[in-house]
Image (tube, grey):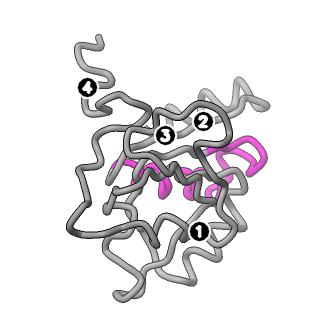
Amino acid sequence: MKKRFQKVMEKRRTQEVLITGHSLGGGLAALVAYDIVKEGLAKKEQVTLITLGQSMVGEKTFAEKYEQQVQHSYRVVRRGDFIPHYPGQHRGYEYNGREVYYKKYGMESKGSDGFKVCEHNNCSKKQVNPVESTYNDVYFEKNVTEYGMNCK
């Protein structure tokens, strides 16, 4: 896959690269975004990462390096989603990218009053209650596990 990506980028040197992922796939997408920039396959200005309910993927040193490499990185988190806080800071993991926090479970609110771009990457952490935590499958009123089904 790396060779195919290199070929595309050789032909389209100024092409913007958008990488997305959900849950554990969001964590993998973050690692891919980091590798693309680190390996010089695209410039950091070209790469944007947007994840939904992304799990944590590295410790503090990695998070600091990540911030230098992937400048346009957004972790969309909705209230009640516990996956973005797993495996947890108590185990040495840190958040990467900028957190975009939606206060409502279904994220049904429209406009900027429904979300907050967080300064310290932990505003959703204050809203996780294990008793009320729900699955992380619903984002933007859609079950994201159904995205891409029957694609050919």
Question: Mark 2 falls on what kind of element?
Answer: strand
> Mark 2 and mark 1: span between their CA atoms?
21 Å
- Label 3 crowding class (10 Å Cα cut-off): few <14, some 14-19, many 20+? many
First in sequence: mark 3 vs mark 4: 3
Question: Mark 3 falls on what kind of element?
Answer: strand
Question: Circle 3 sits on which residue?
Answer: 20
Taking 111 as reference, is 103 left or right? left
First in sequence: mark 2 vs mark 1: 2
Q: In which quarter of the image is the N terminus?
A: top left
Say the numbered circle drawn on residue 34.
Answer: none
- Residue in view at x 64 percent, y 35 percent: 17
- Magenta stretch holds residue 30: yes
Highlighted range, magenta: 25-48
- Label 2 crowding class (10 Å Cα cut-off): few <14, some 14-19, many 20+? few
Q: Is there CB contact under 8 Å for labels 3 and 4?
A: no
> Mark 3 and mark 2: span between their CA atoms?
7 Å
Question: Circle 2 sits on which residue?
Answer: 18
Q: Is there CB contact under 8 Å for labels 3 and 2?
A: yes
Q: In which quarter of the image is the C terminus?
A: top left
